[in-house]
Image (cartoon, helix red, strand yellow):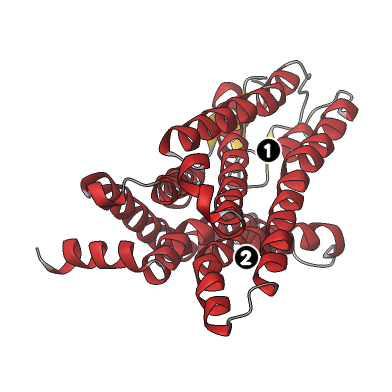
Amino acid sequence: MAAFNLTLSDSTTFILMGIPGLEAAHLWISIPLSMFYVIGLLGNFMILFVVGKEVTLHKPMYLLICMLALTDIGMPTSIVPRALFIFWFNLKLITLGGCLTQMFFIHLVSVMHSAVLVTMAFDRYVAICNPLRYTTIVTNTQIAKLGLMALIKAILFILPLPLLLSSLPFCANHIIPHTFCEHIGFAKLSCGDITVNRIYSLVIAFLVTGLDLMLIILSYGLIMRAVVRISSKKAHQKTLSTCTAHVCVILASYIPGLFSTLMHRFGQDMAPHTHIILANFYFLLPAMLNPIIYGMKTKELRDKMGQYTFSR
């Protein structure tokens, strides 16, 4: 209690509560949380190792898979270790700088993740709609440039978030009823005007997530139009099978996020701890499922991963 009183008088220190209302179950909740995290780390590091080791996999598609694996490592790593410190050791204090840093990396990696999915959709579009020019349009160098552009875009869009928050005054309430620092949730603790923060959050939602999703839908609309024009049923199936893994990854990435958003908008009757648990698993599930999806659906990668897994 003394630590809590000290914190409330310190304008630069906050308290992450974890999952309010389920404090007694924190240890039990940490079990699936840590398991999903470890499985995701192992799967994504395995992909990075195999692709890096095998020269035959040094192709644009596998470079994109590696970029996705990096974001799938970064997203849960921005959240889970801090949550486990709360669940296991009751270490709830976090500085303003620590909170803003965590928030920056959470949103940065989320924007990068979305950008990689768009680039993958572009890769599949060129492979199916313009196959003769695929090797000249989609090269490792081009993919690396797109990845760098995505990183720069993410930094430019996300950097204003902690800058805007750092200029806000924080008065009495320093208790964050969550396992991590999220932009609007943290902004609501301020006793100042957060209108700019709300508007900028909407701008990011429309210009980043909304636009990326529209580009993915457009890419697959053009792909479906090209597939319909193919007369051979066998060619239909072969062409669509090249998109299966990416479509599954898109669904695994966007459906939990959409579900979480709908719960926030229309699930006012739901207990707050339900929202917090959903928010945590929204970051965990794609990171755990994506390497499994690509490991199962991409034959060349599956074979190479099998060699390294069972030959040692």
Q: Residue at x 49, y 34 (%)?
A: 142
Query: Which residue in the rendered view is the most extreme toward the top?
Result: 167
Q: Which residue is mark 1?
A: 175
- Determine the secondary structure under disc 1: strand
Against 115, is 121 above or below?
below
Instruction: Name the disc covering residue 196, or none.
Output: none
Rate crowding at label 1 as few (under 14), some (14 to 19) or many (20 or more) other CA atoms within 10 Å: some
- In the depicted view, which residue is nearer to us: 107 or 21? 107
- Determine the secondary structure under disc 2: helix
Q: Which residue is mark 2?
A: 251
Residue 58 point in image, percent of width and height: 32, 45
Of labels 2 and 1, the one closer to you: 2
For the C terminus, give its image quadrant: bottom left
Disc 2 marks a residue whose amino acid type is: Leu
Q: Residue at x 37, y 66 (%)?
A: 295
Residue 38 point in image, percent of width and height: 35, 57
Q: Earlier in the sequence, mark 2 or mark 1?
A: 1
- In the depicted view, which residue is nearer to us: 269 or 284? 284
Rate crowding at label 2 as few (under 14), some (14 to 19) or many (20 or more) other CA atoms within 10 Å: few
Q: Residue at x 53, y 41 (%)?
A: 137
Residue 219 point in image, percent of width and height: 69, 55
User: Residue 81 appears in which quarter of the rendering?
Assistant: top left
